[in-house]
């Protein structure tokens, strides 16, 4: 059996997620003028007086940097509602950190602000577009005019030659329009299309989620798209996309199930070999390579898995990330319940812990929106009755 034998399987995969995250998301404010249907933050029109202060923000950035300099993303609310945003970004970037922002497309985002961001060196700008037309996008965002406003902001970004990332939540609202959406992302010259699969939390509702079979279809479609699209594709709350990619690659390389010596489990090394890609570091999941800090300093495994495990005002982020029980549990796929716990893909996939929590109330439960039946369960079904 031939596989990529380049011997360089240990780039960013070497980050030990028990010690340090790959990415830190900091909700710099919860203030936002929009009222999107799926909003995780239940955003408020004005900043909360308990928000982390400028000094606390600087201290947080120092702590984050000390955790082996992970990627830092400013999110909201609308980050533009935070007055010291560019000072915070400047401070982090001068330390050598990679910082990006995800502002809401409100009149707050001006061309001047974008120019300022460029000067400071913000590495990437992400805008949300959840449909290829004003009708679909605005309905999902519950904000008439949001589509036009977003397109206008993106044009500024293009004029300033700044790299654009488009974030899209896949749900009932846009499931039938993904082809048009993919084309729009290309037309807008995005360098990255970041796909979120709806997690039914906050304003995100169960009925708006697509079915497990539809998830499967989306993943297969995305994988084919990724071969030709002029932008990179990444997913979040869609850990099982990694499983689909690996399965497809195994098919393409004519590697049959059982032919790889993965001792019933696909590790990140096996995955890298099959994958041939180093871009996706070993299966980031909520609390496992990923950590979220709220506007008031609460630390959670992710914004979509809102269990508060500590507060940076009292405990350093690194201590919460490394030592809190919830975080430690989340990093043990062998302890996941149901099919995720026995699935051979549990180390590289593990299902969305956020969706498991949102649907069942237990963050260790199985991913409720995965159609795959693990090998171990199939073997069990076939075993003769004794
Ligand atoms: S059963 Fe769980 S671990 Fe296995 S592919 Fe599905 S979501 Fe991933």
Image: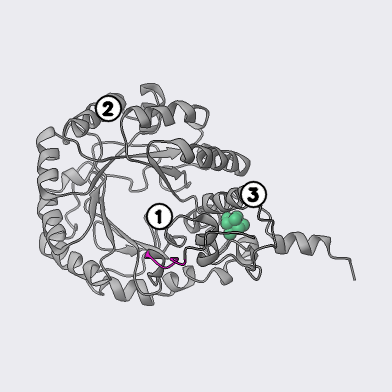
379 with respect to 306 (left or right): right
In terms of secondary structure, where does tag 2 sit?
Answer: helix
State which region is magenta: 7-11
Question: Horizontal and vertical percent for residue 353?
Answer: 49, 59
Q: Is residue 178 left or right of residue 94?
A: right
Viewer-proximal residue, 34 or 122? 122
Please name whichever residue, 116 or 27, is drawn nearer the observer in this view of the structure: 116
Q: Which mark is first along the chain, 1 or 3?
A: 3
Q: Residue at x 37, y 47 (%)?
A: 40
As drawn, the label of residue 151 is 2
Q: Position of residue 169 (x, y in %)?
A: 42, 39
User: Please, what secondary structure does the residue beneath circle 3 have?
Assistant: helix
What is the x, y in percent for residue 20?
A: 34, 70
Q: Which residue is mark 1?
A: 279
Place residue 89 in its image quadrant. bottom left
Query: Residue 251 got which mark?
Result: 3
- Location of residue 128 in the rendering, given as x and y in whole percent from the top left corner: 33, 37
Asked whether the viewer can see residue 95, the reply is yes
């Amino acid at each position: 059996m031939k596989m990529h034998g380049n011997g360089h399987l240990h780039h960013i995969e070497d980050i030990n997620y028990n010690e340090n995250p790959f990415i830190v998301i900091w909700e710099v404010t919860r203030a936002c003028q929009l009222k999107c249907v799926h909003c995780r933050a239940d955003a408020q029109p004005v900043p909360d007086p308990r928000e982390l202060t400028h000094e606390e923000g600087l201290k947080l950035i120092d702590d984050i940097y000390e955790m082996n300099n992970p990627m830092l993303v400013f999110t909201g609310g609308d980050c533009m509602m935070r007055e010291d945003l560019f000072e915070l970004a400047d401070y982090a970037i001068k330390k050598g950190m990679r910082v990006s922002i995800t502002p809401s497309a409100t009149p707050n985002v001006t061309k001047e602000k974008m120019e300022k961001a460029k000067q400071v060196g913000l590495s990437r700008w992400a805008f949300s577009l959840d449909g290829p037309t004003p009708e679909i996008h605005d309905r999902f965002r519950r904000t008439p005019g949001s589509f036009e406003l977003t397109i206008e902001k993106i044009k500024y970004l293009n004029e300033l030659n700044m790299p654009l990332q488009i974030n899209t939540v896949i749900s009932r609202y846009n499931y039938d329009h993904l082809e048009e959406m993919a084309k729009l992302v290309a037309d807008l010259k995005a360098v990255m299309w970041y796909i979120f699969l709806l997690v039914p939390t906050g304003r995100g509702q169960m009925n708006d989620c697509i079915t497990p079979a539809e998830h499967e279809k989306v993943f297969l479609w995305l994988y084919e798209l990724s071969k030709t699209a002029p932008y990179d594709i990444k997913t979040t709350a869609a850990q099982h996309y990694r499983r689909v990619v690996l399965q497809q690659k195994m098919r393409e390389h004519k590697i049959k199930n059982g032919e790889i010596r993965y001792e019933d489990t696909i590790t990140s090394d096996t995955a890298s070999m099959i994958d041939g890609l180093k871009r996706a570091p070993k299966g980031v999941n909520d609390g496992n390579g990923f950590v979220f800090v709220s506007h008031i300093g609460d630390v959670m495994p992710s914004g979509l898995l809102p269990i508060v495990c500590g507060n940076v005002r009292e405990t350093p982020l690194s201590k919460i990330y490394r030592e809190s029980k919830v975080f430690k549990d989340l990093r043990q796929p062998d302890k996941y319940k149901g099919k995720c716990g026995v699935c051979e893909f549990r180390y590289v996939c593990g299902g969305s812990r956020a969706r498991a929590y949102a649907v069942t109330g237990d963050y260790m439960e199985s991913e409720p929106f995965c159609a795959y039946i693990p090998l171990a369960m199939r073997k069990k079904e076939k075993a003769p009755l004794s």
